[in-house]
């Protein structure tokens, strides 16, 4: 029995995830049966290929190489969230994104894609990477999902509106190839989700130009002259993104840890994604404990994890 979890933020939550990986290795008695870290996903900002969640900041070569090495040395792949749906052909030659691909091109690491343009480019120029089909594609039609799963992808991330559609899930032939996003914070059936992904993609492109400009002003995406042409403020400031692990439990797309072990794993699924690249660390701690720690040892495991985070200066002891 395997429960292979894909965890958020190899860059933003770098030390956080390294500490958790070490805890999982050193103290397996705290965790549910079969828990493994299948990958840690994310991006090195300010990569313009990034999508799904906007990422601030800048990453230098030494940091990029350190992150790749420290996860890969633990047998943990990095999975790049290169799912920006707004890319054009001119963006494929981006030096920073291509440098990242070169640094991590060792046969272990993976890429999540949504844009056919970028997918074709990566398959041609970086054939060593395993390719994941992103939930950002919004494939909710069952027949289209089955067709997607039949394609040459390492993993297909199922749209979370299908999370509890068991009539659809049962008919999937290769369930081990499928990944379920268990803690989706978005409203079920959200009609603006695709627009939100587009807004984030454009924001990532605008941010890269802002950094190149050397401007001393604070970055303000809404000040871009083209902002009103393609979106409104509510797309950028969606309140759903700050939901806690306790607030998502009532959503119809929610998958509980009990359901993972009692329903989904017996069905043949083993890939589970925890989202959280942009949430606060204490909320992320709770998500990890909720999904991966044994219920009867959750409090003890949480304390141990928090102590390690405080000792390493990741969380302030005076919070």
Image: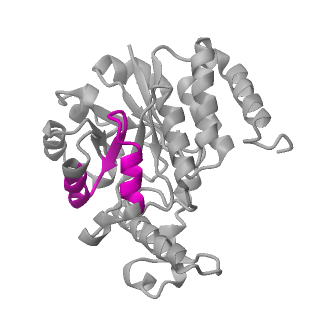
Residue at image point 49% right, 53% down? 44
Figure check: 294 above or below 252: above
Total number of numbered discs in the rendering: 0
Residue 194 covered by magenta stretch: no
Q: Quadrant of the N terminus?
A: top left
Where does residue 67 sit, x and y in percent of width and height?
53, 41
Left or right for 206, reference 287 = left
Where does residue 105 sit, x and y in percent of width and height?
35, 42
Residue at image point 19% right, 50% down? 124
Residue lying furthest bottom: 225
**Front-most of residues 23 and 268:** 23
Residue 102 covered by magenta stretch: yes
Residue 47: name its quadrant: bottom left
Where does residue 275 sit, x and y in percent of width and height?
48, 43
Residue at image point 62% right, 16% down? 26
Left or right for 181, reference 125 = right
Is residue 150 among the parts visible in the rendering? yes
**Front-most of residues 225 and 25:** 25
Q: Quadrant of the C terminus?
A: top right
Figure check: 251 above or below 117: above
Q: How is the image coloured?
A: one colour
Is residue 50 among the parts visible in the rendering? no
Q: Which residues are magenta?
A: 96-122
């Amino acid at each position: 029995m395997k429960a292979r979890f894909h965890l958020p933020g190899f860059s933003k939550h770098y030390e956080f995830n390294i500490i958790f990986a070490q805890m999982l290795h050193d103290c397996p008695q705290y965790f549910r049966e079969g828990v493994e870290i299948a990958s840690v996903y994310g991006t090195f900002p300010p990569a313009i290929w990034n999508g799904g969640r906007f990422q601030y900041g800048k990453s230098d070569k030494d940091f990029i190489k350190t992150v790749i090495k420290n996860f890969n040395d633990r047998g943990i792949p990095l999975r790049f969230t290169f799912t920006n749906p707004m890319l054009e052909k001119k963006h494929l030659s981006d030096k920073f994104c291509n440098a990242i691909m070169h640094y991590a091109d060792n046969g272990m690491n993976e890429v999540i894609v949504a844009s056919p343009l970028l997918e074709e480019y990566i398959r041609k120029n970086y054939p060593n990477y395993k390719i994941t089909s992103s939930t950002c594609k919004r494939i909710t039609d069952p027949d289209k999902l089955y067709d997607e799963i039949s394609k040459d992808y390492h993993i297909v991330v199922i749209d979370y509106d299908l999370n509890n559609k068991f009539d659809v899930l049962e008919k999937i032939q290769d369930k081990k190839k499928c990944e379920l996003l268990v803690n989706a914070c978005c409203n079920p059936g959200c009609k603006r989700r695709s627009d939100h992904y587009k807004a984030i993609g454009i924001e990532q492109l605008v941010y890269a130009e802002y950094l190149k400009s050397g401007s001393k002003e604070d970055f303000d995406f809404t000040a871009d002259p083209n902002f009103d042409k393609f979106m409104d403020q509510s797309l950028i400031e969606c309140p759903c993104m700050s939901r806690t692990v306790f607030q998502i439990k009532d959503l119809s797309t929610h998958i509980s840890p009990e359901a993972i072990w009692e329903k989904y794993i017996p069905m043949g699924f083993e890939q589970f994604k925890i989202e959280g690249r942009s949430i606060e660390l204490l909320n992320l701690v709770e998500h990890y404990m909720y999904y991966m720690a044994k219920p009867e040892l959750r409090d003890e495991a949480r304390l141990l994890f928090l102590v390690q985070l405080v000792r390493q200066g990741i969380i302030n002891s005076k919070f």
